[in-house]
Image (cartoon, helix red, strand yellow):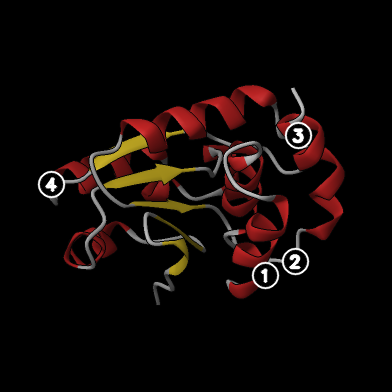
Amino acid sequence: MMEIRPLTPDYAVSPQIDPGDFPAIRAAGYVTVIDNRPDAEIPPSHHAAAMRKAAEAAGLAFVVNPVIGGMLTMDNVTAQAEAMAASPGPVLAYCASGNRSSIVWALAQSGRMDTDAILAATARAGYQLGHLRPQIEALAAR
């Protein structure tokens, strides 16, 4: 069962979604879906190519930005920020639990939003990211 967890009015995260969820995602007002889950973690039915086909059939933009658990890179953060900026409307990002999609969003917001506001938004959605405060603040200071 799909579980959309909004962090802001324009960005939400979700645990793994199914190919059949895209019409409901579009009906919920999202226009872009970001896949933060590497294909190696999931069955072929949920690989990026299959998900892209289902998303586009539902009229959604689909962006692949795989975040490998424990191996998040600044390229992931930049790609997430660029996909969010390019979207003409609300974005839904997903991974296994929504945690990586929250982390990459939090880091992408550094310097754009107050750190406390970033951490409060993720906490409201059930993701405790206080341990990222030093990284968020370091990125904001750049």
Task: First in sequence, mark 3 or 4: give its number.
Answer: 4
Dots 4, 2 in contact, CB < 8 A: no
Report the Cα–Cα distance between label 4 and label 2: 33 Å
**Three-letter amino acid code of the residue under disc 3:** Met
**Three-letter amino acid code of the residue under disc 2:** Gln
Would you name the residue on which mark 4 appears?
A: 59
Residue 25 x %, y % = 26, 62
Would you name the residue on which mark 1 appears?
A: 123
Q: In terms of image quadrants, where is residue 68?
A: top right
Q: Secondary structure at mark 2?
A: loop
- Quadrant assignment for the N terminus: bottom left
Would you name the residue on which mark 3 appears?
A: 71
Report the Cα–Cα distance between label 1 and label 4: 31 Å
**Three-letter amino acid code of the residue under disc 4:** Gly
Residue 124 x %, y % = 61, 74
Q: In terms of image quadrants, where is residue 63?
A: top left
Report the Cα–Cα distance between label 1 and label 2: 5 Å
Would you name the residue on which mark 2 appears?
A: 128
Kindly identify the residue that appears in the image at 72 percent across and 43 percent down.
Answer: 69
**Three-letter amino acid code of the residue under disc 1:** Ala
> Where 74 falls versus 111 (above or below)?
above
Q: Secondary structure at mark 4?
A: loop
Residue 82 x %, y % = 44, 27
Other residues around mark 1 within 10 Å, as few (<14) / some (14–19) / many (≥20): some
Task: First in sequence, mark 1 or 3: give its number.
Answer: 3
Report the Cα–Cα distance between label 1 and label 3: 22 Å
Q: Secondary structure at mark 1?
A: helix
Report the Cα–Cα distance between label 3 and label 4: 31 Å
- Decide if residue 5 is on the left or right side of residue 134: left
Report the Cα–Cα distance between label 2 and label 3: 18 Å
